[in-house]
Image: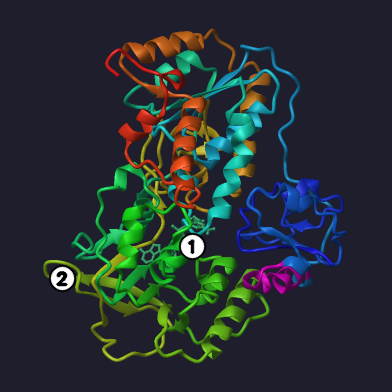
Amino acid sequence: MAYVITQNCCKDASCVPVCPVDCIRPAGDDSDSPITEMLYIDPDSCIDCGACMDACPVGAIYYEDELPDSQLRFRSINAEYFARHPLQSPTYPPVVKHGRIEPGALRVAIVGAGPAACYAADALIDIDGVEVSVFERLPTPFGLVRAGVAPDHQRTKSVVSAFERAMSSKRLAAYFNVDVGTDVDHDELLRYHHAVIYAVGMTHSKELGVPGEQLPGSYAASDVVAWYNGHPDHIDRRIDLTGHRAVIIGNGNVALDVARVLLAGTAHLESTDITDDALNSLRDSTVEEVVIVGRRGIRHAAFSVGEFLALGSLQGVDVVIEGDDDLQPAPDDDVETVFKLQIAREYTERPPTPGHKRVVFRFQARPVEILGPDRVSAVRLARTAAGAARPGDDEGEILPTSLVLRSIGYRGTAVGGLPFSADTGIVPNEAGRVVDDQGHVRTGIYVTGWIKRGPRGVIGTNRGCAEETVAAVLADFDDGLLERPIGGRADLDAALADRGVTHVDWSGWRAIDAAERRAGDARSRPRIKLLDIASMLAAVTPANSTPGPQA
Ligand code: NAP
């Protein structure tokens, strides 16, 4: 018997170092293994100790005999991974190690409080003596874990428990509800900290650049995700779900999340932290078909195996594969491509069920125009290479729809005072150290997460990314590059208070969290989110916040 990693794997690799027989892959800088979206346990080497299950922050690991029906398939998926990539010599992910640092000698500001920031804070707080300040525009932490992870993935959201130790440390000060760039600027952060790590992520969706993109009824999928997750910037959004078909452009995991939420019915969402507004809209929704358009074939589909497989277990929903007939694996296909092809073949073999809703994967097609005139009425698709012939190909196929969701990834925006590459959308850096246009390192300034490496990877990918950046901070500290006199925290607090900035600290967030959980308890839900900043601040007792004179 063995343990099995399943769909919810966040890939933060907490399980890897605790495994006494080192049978979880891919791990660390294991260059023999492919880059994958999840981790796998070798069933032949697993000794059933359960250490990995205890360490997994998102409950994605099950004992083989206890796998829920919907996750049974992962038993063979874990085994097949090792059939193709037999276990090699042990490798462990890099873990930042450093001796005690004299209190006051290294204080680091982290801008952002999403998973990338939290992993960086965790690695820094691990070093005795290091002080950390975390700045976040909203009164609430956790970024895309709170506002990006789909509400039916509550287990994934539980990864935040892994950050509790660092965030509640006496050496960490949370400055939530403080906008870097407005309430405090980059130079000021450097006056109070030896180093600044930007973990600001990417908040803007890429644009398609096709006519009609701005018509009512056409949205960024990420805005819809933010809406159903109750992000304060999106609570006034109204998404019209009264049409029969929705079309999603792009086939990454965001596209699959949105398709699932649109089609799966509200019964399973009632017990989540989705907003009431979104829940009511979904209850009244008449959407019966979601078409997910990918410009390349299934071999290049951006979704991960687990999410693709999960769609096939949705009650009352058929999965249809169109536009790519080449579903047989080739010798040089990587292991995850083989899984995707296998699952796609199974979907094509399932007969359609009358009355079922449908999620249609349309491969090798791209939108050339979104048609109006006053609001979205259709999208014109053109075939890309090797797509199956369809009527009307010459002018492109017209697919009627009232809802188009652009899910083609995120783009970074320039951060005040930092170099920025418009081509790649990231802050140029060397292993986390920010570099300017001439390739010179900007001493004391670092990046981690999407703004460092681009919008790729699952939550746990940020762990190794943050460890690399923190290792760079510590190396620069050891080399004496960060040594200079800085102001104390009390001076920073006074400066913020003087200009009327109300900052929320960790206990303030805990008060918001408790208020949301209490409201959730009454309705058997994990939480009912507070949606606007005023309500969040009202939940913070005076003892938990530091109000400025105008607050
Ligand atoms: P993504 O994975 O980068 O997928 C973007 C999709 O858009 C790709 O199919 C891409 O096709 C397509 N695309 C890009 N530009 C296009 C254009 N101009 N026209 C047509 N199609 C275009 O992005 P994402 O879905 O936003 O996800 C971002 C990251 O978050 C990913 O790493 C994802 O795994 C992660 N995430 C994970 C989960 C989860 O684990 N459940 C959930 C949400 C997000 P090409 O491949 O041809 O460029």
* Residue that appears at 34% across and 65% down: 282
Answer yes or no: disc 1 within 8 Å of ligand 1. Answer: yes
Please say if 298 is above or below 191: below
Q: Is residue 439 left or right of residue 178?
A: right
Q: Is residue 72 magenta?
A: yes
Q: Position of residue 272 (x, y in %)?
A: 47, 55
Expressed as whole percent of the image width and height from the top left, the position of residue 326 reads: 53, 85
Q: What are the residue bounds of the magenta stretch?
A: 67-82
* Residue pictured at 46% horizontal, 82% vertical: 318
Tell me the number on the disc at residue 372. 2
The answer to whether residue 440 is above or below residue 252 is: above
- Amino acid at dot 1: Asn
- Image height of 111 relative to 79, above or below: above
Residue tagged 1: 253
Between the residue at mark 2 and the residue at mark 1, the CA separation in whole angstroms equals 28 Å
Callout 1: helix, strand or loop?
helix
Image location (x, y in percent) of residue 285:
30, 69
Residue at 41% from the left image edge and 19% from the top image edge = 542
Q: Sequence-wise, which precedes: disc 2 or disc 1? A: 1
Residue at position x 64%, y 16% in the image: 480
Q: Nearer the viewer, residue 67 or 209?
A: 67
